[in-house]
């Protein structure tokens, strides 16, 4: 079976959210699995010398307009969240705990946490919100609350973030197909063509 597609994102990335609604179906069309890698973007920005789009002169206003436009074009539920951006440590740790203990629930949780923030305007930096999202899925919030505080899960998120940076990831979404890197939601069409043609 062909190698899985690797999908790197941060749960506070609008473009990552948009890509998350499409990446698994894209992979499936080409007989691929898709591995999600939630990470923390702040260390990646520090490593690359970059700053958040929303904080950049001119680019910040453009990006906010573009997020609205992209959502309308693709029919993705979206509203600009307040506050923005937010820390996603609890959400990312929850994903990795589920990935290790209830792997079939990890991606559904990822979709739910993205929607909670970008479609429902809930503050996913709040651990209570993260646990409420999980509980609404039928998961045991008390068990998850304990799980995300374990040394193993804390280390897992650090390792994923450090590993992503070491692999060249500097933004989100970041998609890797057979070693080929594609940065940005607007590269999903190129990812599809790469899979169709076998590269170029």
Image (spheres, rainbow, N blue to C red):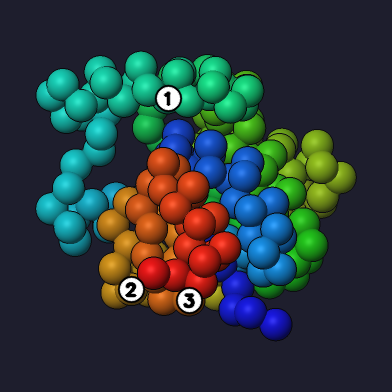
- Residue that label 3 marks: 178
Tell me whether the residue at label 2 lies in contact with that at label 3, contact meaning CB atoms closer than 8 angstroms: no
Badge 1 element: helix
The furthest residue to the bottom: 1
CA distance separating discs 2 and 3 = 13 Å
The nearer-to-camera label among 2 and 3 is 3
Q: Residues within 10 Å of mark 2 (few under 14, many from 20)?
A: few
Q: Is residue 193 left or right of residue 42?
A: right
Residue linked to disc 1: 67
Q: Residue at x 48, y 76 (%)?
A: 178
Determine which of the numbered discs, if any, sits on residue 167 in the image: 2
Q: Where does the image place residue 143, in percent across and percent down from the top left?
A: 76, 57
Residue at the image point whose x is 42% and y is 24% from the top: 67
Residue 120 placed where, x, y %? 62, 22
Judged from the image, the secondary structure of the residue bearing numbered disc 2 is loop
Q: Distance between the Cα atoms at labels 1 and 2?
A: 27 Å
Q: Name the side, left or right, on which 40 lies relative to 57.
A: right
Relative to 186, residue 103 above or below? below
Q: Is residue 123 visible?
A: yes
Q: Front-most of 190 and 127?
A: 190
* Residue 173 shows up from this direction: no
């Amino acid at each position: 079976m062909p190698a899985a597609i690797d999908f790197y994102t941060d749960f506070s990335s609008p473009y990552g959210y948009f890509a998350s609604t499409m990446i698994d179906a894209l992979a499936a069309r080409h007989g691929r699995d898709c591995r999600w890698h939630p990470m923390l973007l702040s260390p990646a920005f520090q490593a690359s010398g970059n700053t958040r789009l929303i904080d950049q002169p001119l680019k910040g206003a453009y990006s906010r307009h573009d997020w609205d436009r992209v959502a309308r074009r693709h029919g993705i539920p979206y509203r600009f969240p307040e506050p923005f951006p937010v820390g996603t440590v609890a959400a990312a740790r929850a994903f990795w705990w589920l990935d290790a203990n209830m792997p079939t629930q990890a991606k559904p949780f990822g979709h739910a946490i993205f929607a909670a923030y970008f479609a429902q305007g809930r503050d996913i930096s709040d651990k209570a919100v993260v646990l409420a999202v999980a509980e609404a899925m039928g998961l045991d919030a008390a068990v998850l609350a304990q799980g995300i505080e374990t040394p193993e899960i804390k280390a897992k998120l650090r390792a994923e973030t450090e590993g992503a940076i070491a692999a060249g990831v500097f933004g989100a979404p970041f998609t890797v197909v057979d070693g080929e890197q594609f940065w940005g939601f607007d590269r999903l069409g190129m990812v599809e063509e790469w899979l169709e043609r076998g590269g170029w």
